[in-house]
Image (cartoon, rainbow, N blue to C red):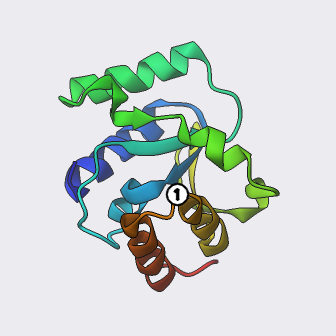
């Protein structure tokens, strides 16, 4: 997926899915216009619990945009929620009537990416840290 597709899909998910969400990974860099790197999925974690209905609705939104259901990666919540005090490390980036979209602070983004430590992850850390302010 390219930057335009990611932005459109994330915005539609936030517009149509209620709740609080955290955008992570390479898709976050594209969403914030920090990187043009293509990615295969959107790493999206619910702040709270996610129901099967919400999961299916997200997959349906992706499918209607011509994406496979696995284009929405909710498994990133596992890694996010293992981090100590992760909720205090979130910054609001978008708000709708029924949902909010957050991004991680630089500190939290680094922790999540360093755990994998691939060359791409290290580059993503550099781009993120130079491309955002923690406010």
Q: Name the residue under label 1.
A: 116
In the image, residue 127 above or below residue 85: below
Q: Quick one: SS at disc 1?
A: helix
Q: Is residue 30 left or right of residue 121?
A: left
Residue drawn at point x = 59 percent, y = 59 percent = 115
In the image, residue 24 above or below residue 47: below
In the image, residue 114 above or below residue 20: below
Q: Position of residue 30 (x, y in %)?
A: 32, 62
Q: Where is residue 21 in the image (x, y as percent from the top left)?
A: 58, 44
Q: Can residue 46 be seen in this view?
A: no
Residue drawn at point x = 34 percent, y = 20 percent = 60
Residue drawn at point x = 42 percent, y = 26 percent = 58
Q: Where is residue 68 in the image (x, y as percent from the top left)?
A: 26, 26
Q: Can residue 67 be seen in this view?
A: yes
**Quarter-of-image position of residue 34:** bottom left
**Quarter-of-image position of residue 99:** top right
Classed neighbour count for the residue bearing mark 1: other residues with Cα under 10 Å, few (<14), some (14–19), many (≥20): few
């Amino acid at each position: 997926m390219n930057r335009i597709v990611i932005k459109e899909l994330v915005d539609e998910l936030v517009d149509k899915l209620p709740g609080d969400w955290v955008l992570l990974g390479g898709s976050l860099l594209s969403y914030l216009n920090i990187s043009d790197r293509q990615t295969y999925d959107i790493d999206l974690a619910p702040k709270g619990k996610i129901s099967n209905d919400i999961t299916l609705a997200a997959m349906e939104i992706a499918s209607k945009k011509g994406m496979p259901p696995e284009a929405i990666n909710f498994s990133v919540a596992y890694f996010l929620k293992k981090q100590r005090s992760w909720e205090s490390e979130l910054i609001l980036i978008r708000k709708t009537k029924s949902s909010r979209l957050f991004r991680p602070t630089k500190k939290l983004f680094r922790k999540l990416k360093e755990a994998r430590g691939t060359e791409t992850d290290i580059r993503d850390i550099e781009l993120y840290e130079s491309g955002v302010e923690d406010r």
